[in-house]
Amino acid sequence: MLPVLLSIGSRSSIEKKWGFFGHKRINRIATFTLPPEMFGFYKEHIEYLTEHAVDPDKRRYAVDGEAQRHYIDIDHYVHSGEDPFEVVPRKWKDAVAKFSEDTLQAYGIVPWHIKVMKFRLEKAFENKNVDLILKYSADIGHYIGDAHVPLHTTENYNGQLTNQKGIHGLWESRLVEINSENYDYFIGKAEYIEDMESFIWEAVEASHRAVDSVFRLEIEVTKDFDSDRKYSFERRGNTTVSVYSYEFSQEYHRRMNGMVERRLRAAISAVGSVWYTAWVDAGQPDLSSLQNTPPSAELLEEMKELDIHFHNDKHKGRICE
């Protein structure tokens, strides 16, 4: 019996990358890695950055071309024994020349899109545009978070190719939600990134190197659990659903030996560092002059419309929470 919450098959229907909970926590804690020159502004808007960390997920049905910004199926491009990070060019124009833009879009563009978003945030800082600083900061946090998840770097994103359907939600949502209070969030300070392209690709590569362990350890734990112990029932709202049991989830988490926490911590550090780097590259504008400037009515209306689209999609059954 597959858990109702976690058994959705198509990539477009898997909603919870790091879970909404995880994405919000990444952006929130990243705020505290910033230097004093940035911290005042970001702390003032910490609730916006936290709540809107999930906007890219909400846009997946409202905006054409959004879905592929969250992942890269890097293993699609290789045959047995090849290293995908030697096969796939890091520079967009080189990758397009080798594989075509249609192919890249079909199999995910997250590392390239993060670089685009960093440039947009840099320009927002230069123009001292509060709306865009907030919007792009929140979005960057989301895409960087996704790049730190192993299952966002493989065609077998939900175990659908290895009879492990549901592992996506297990790794990203269930394990984080039941263990997050025990994680160490003392990350240290954001650091300037000298080579943004290499930094992003190294994060993706670190995620992908963990893919084999993600699948292998789930198989090993499953062998030790009968199906009636692997899954349990929980009440979610007015519905009783089947989920991975607490005992199974914790054993899987234990055998990964801190992997989820390490990737979460790395994501938080990366988000703060990318925000900081964009600010430095923009000439370190004085953000204190922007304090006490709330998001505009136009931005708030845009976010309201996004929420309406999102809730309509949930009502139509296109989104699984």
Image (spheres, rainbow, N blue to C red):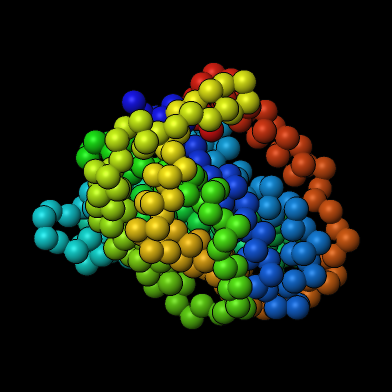
Q: Residue at x 57, y 61 (%)?
A: 182
Nearer to me, 254 or 215: 254
187 lies left or right of 77: right
For the point 54% across and 19% down, the residue is 316
Residue 206 at x, y = what percent?
35, 66
Say if residue 233 shows up in the picture: yes
What is the count of numbered marks?
Answer: 0
Q: Quadrant of the N terminus?
A: top left
Q: Report the front residue among 38 and 251.
A: 251
Q: Nearer the viewer, residue 269 or 295?
A: 269
User: For this view, does 180 lie left or right of residue 305?
Assistant: left
Please state the horizontal and vertical placement of residue 201, each as a whole percent of the image: 37, 66
Picture coordinates of residue 64, whole percent (x, y) = 49, 35
Rendered image quadrant of residue 39: bottom right
Q: Residue at x 80, y 51 (%)?
A: 295
Above or below, comparing residue 317 to residue 32 in the picture? above
